[in-house]
Image: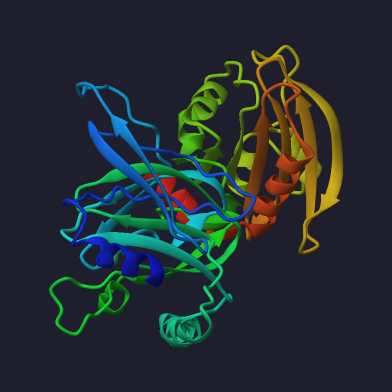
Amino acid sequence: MGALMGMMSGEVGVLPPATFIGAPAAMPGTTQSVIYNLAAGSYVLLNVAGEEPQIATFVVEGEAVDIDFEPEADLTVALVDFVFGLPVELPAGEQTWLIENLGEQWHELIVIPVPDGTTLEDAMSLLMATEEEAEGEGTMPEFAAVWSPMSAGERAWVQVDLAPGTYLVSCFIEDVNSDEHAIHAALGMLQIVTVKDTVTYTDPNGMFTLDYPATLAAVRPDFASTLGFPFPSVALADSEATIDLSGAAQPVPEGGWGIGVMFIPAAFFTQMGMPADASLNDLAMLFAPQPGNEEGAEVVSISEVALADGRAAIERVVAGATEDNVSIFYEAGEGVYALAALLSSPGGRTDAMVVAFMLTVNSIEFTSTVEAIIAGMGGE
Ligand SMILES: [Cu+2]
């Protein structure tokens, strides 16, 4: 980036006043896509990553039209003087980021992989070392993603695909108001970001936590209440539609899937007529589909399995006309049972979904008490 900035500042005298709209870097052998809403005018494409700069120009003509369309962004990343508006935890995998410069100066977004556990202080000394090294040998650190300088007020959408790990996000542009040529990173545009395969969900009432696949986008707290169960719960799915349709016993869209988790006090089972010494299997059967049910669901198999910590659980596989399910039922705490279910479109369940579901099940921590559940029910 030092080379890019040197070139740009060196050319300022001969270029007419220019606006930088930013661009993603494409690493060797990779493709990058980006979406701009370009105003009419002349544009210069500039690549300074190689030995010789590559330059191309193009012109955008015509009248600007109001379009009622914006690409859907998974994340908005704000560039501000001098901080990044960016979460400290991000999901792994392909995402669309809307990058917006809300500041008054140019900004860039450089994402560099760093070892797990790296702190901001470590990052600072790493950058110093890299800068010295770069001056000596002309080497550049390995980048995961780069967004080149963007002028104030500009915005664009870009595809980002980060692997799980720890990253340093920084901006190396010089502060235009600084006599000491301070770089934005030193003024606050330096952040450690952790990219994870899973996202931690914390129940708003503090009853439980779990880690769910980062690819599941929709989160519905207290989902069980919509089904008539006043128990602590959450639903997580690829889309809001999957949650809505599953809840309404309507066909789940092809490829749609999700995970639901609910905590049930032991008293519920006795109230439903189950004997106090009923087996785990007997209790699990209370939630098995009844013959002739509205979703056309049939029990395919029932087996006793062990969770990662050795706890016994009942696994039930159910196939239906509106959705398929795999459910896991076990004792999550003193007098509290957990029912976790993987739902998918009929026939749409994949091994990857089952693996992700079991990771979620094994991450469930019930952090409350049966008394607190019952007190919460009384308050409704
Ligand atoms: Cu900056």
The foreground one among 202 and 8 is 8
The color scheme shown is: rainbow
* Residue at image location 29% in from the left, 30% down from the top: 60
- Closest to the observer, 338 or 342: 342
> From this viewpoint, is residue 1 visible?
no
Residue 118: percent from left, percent from top? 51, 79
Q: At 24% from the left edge and 60% from the top edge, which residue is drawn?
A: 106
Relative placement, left or right, of 97 versus 235 is: left
Picture residue at 65% right of the left edge, 56% below the top: 332
Is 289 left or right of 192, judged from the image as shown?
right
Q: What's the residue at 49%, 58% (across, down)?
A: 145
Q: Nearer the viewer, residue 87 or 110?
A: 110
x%, y% of residue 246? Answer: 57, 24
Residue 359 or 299: which is nearer the viewer?
A: 359
Give the image quarter of residue 362: bottom right
Task: Using the rendered image of the protein, determine whether residue 82 is visible from the camera's viewpoint.
Answer: yes
Q: Is residue 192 left or right of residue 214?
A: left
Q: Quadrant of the N terminus?
A: bottom left
Q: Position of residue 309 (x, y in %)?
A: 76, 64
- Splitting the image into 4 quarters, where does residue 181 fall? bottom left
Quadrant holding ligand 1?
Answer: bottom left
